[in-house]
Image: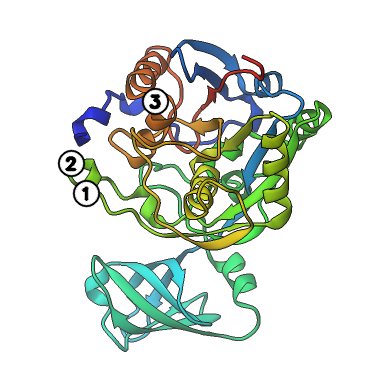
Amino acid sequence: MKLEDFDYYLPEELIAQVPLENRAASRLMVLNKETGEVEHHHFPHIVDELEKGDCLILNDTRVLPARLIGEKKDTGAHIEVLLIKQTENDEWETLVKPAKRIKEGTVVSFGNGLLTATCTSEMDHGGRKFKFDYEGIFIEILEKLGTMPLPPYIHEKLDDQERYQTVYSKELGSAAAPTAGLHFTEEILDAIRAKGVEVAFVTLHVGIGTFRPVSVDNIEEHDMHAEFYNLPEDTAKIINDTKANGGRVITVGTTSTRTLETVAQNNNGEIVAESGWSKIFIYPGFEYKAIDGMVTNFHLPKSSLVMMISALSSRENVLNAYKIAVENKYRFFSFGDAMFIRPQKKGN
């Protein structure tokens, strides 16, 4: 399969720049996984799509306010640092702008010295390792000085930082939000539980690599970034009980899906409690072992995420649905509208 096979036309004005005032006010396209038929709804309709005996799996990761603006200690030059991955207690891999100003030994100060960072090594593509020095608790300082690392296609300032967090976010560690979950409110989750649907959580910390485009023409040569995941014991039991009782496993987002399918791939199709690093690359031809349906957003052209959902339905179904979404002026990407890839009802 070629990269061009997963391209589609998207007018720039359909890229949502700010979240809607009400999380649940977004639209919901329902795509029949088998037939490709499309229906148009608003997001609260997701409650009607779920049935007693199903389970809904959510990613409870929380986004780090990982974007820091500081000054070089020797020159006062402005430096932007994006935290990517913690390698040791106070050492982080980062992306830096402008990277050419940061050499090994360079010291950057944030918040008038509340936090300082010393470059310990240079990496490829603007990457730098920094050792951070501070007094107190690092996360609390980060909450005070940092801002959300919004995706590169969002150019507007985010007034309320919590709008780039899900209402159930808990485990701090992501470089980006699991955006399919942004549509859920506590009221919608309560209504889902009231129907007899089990709601359970996994954690996958979204890496900045999620925004890295697929750059090879033959998609099978694409090297996926690694992301840390955890599937707890209680969630494994809920999924296995759901399957044993004939219910459907519905994931919210490509991140929850990556977690479940990674665990299934590692354990011959079985779902067990497990933590690790996922590099799974899902594209058409992949056989899903864990999930039946997915709530997701509308993804970038030629992205690995479009390939993933094409494997759940079909490339033709997904690209046709995207064409319809453009014609109907759906909002795209992180702050955009949602899609439910609907599996068959039980007993059908």
Q: Quadrant of residue 87?
A: bottom left
Query: Taking 256 as reference, is 95 above or below it?
Result: below
Category of crowding for the residue at label 3, using alpha-carbon neighbours closer than 10 angstroms: few (below 14), some (14–19), many (at least 20): some
Residue 259: x, y in percent?
53, 50
Relative side of 152 to 334, left or right: left
Question: Would you say residue 22 is visible in this rendering?
Answer: no
Q: First in sequence: mark 1 or mark 3?
A: 3
Residue, disc 2:
218
Query: Taking 49 as reference, is 151 above or below it?
Result: below
Q: In the image, which is nearer the foreground, mark 1 or mark 3?
A: 1
Relative side of 4 to 87, left or right: left
Q: 164 or 253, which is in the foreground?
A: 253
CB contact under 8 Å: marks 2 and 3: no
Q: Quadrant of residue 53?
A: top right
From the image, which quarter does the C terminus lie in? Answer: top right
Residue, disc 3:
14
User: Residue at (44%, 67%) from the top-left corner?
Assistant: 83
Relative side of 174 to 248, left or right: left
Residue, disc 1:
221
User: Residue at (70%, 18%) from the top-left corner?
Assistant: 48
User: Residue at (40%, 59%) from the top-left corner?
Assistant: 226
Question: Would you say residue 115 is visible in this rendering?
Answer: yes
Circle 2 SS class: loop
CB contact under 8 Å: marks 2 and 1: yes
The three-letter amino acid code for the residue at tag 2 is Asn
Mark pair 2, 1: CA separation: 6 Å
Residue 135: x, y in percent?
61, 86
Q: First in sequence: mark 2 or mark 3?
A: 3
Q: 248 or 14, which is in the foreground?
A: 248
Q: 220 or 125, which is in the foreground?
A: 220
Residue 142: x, y in percent?
57, 69
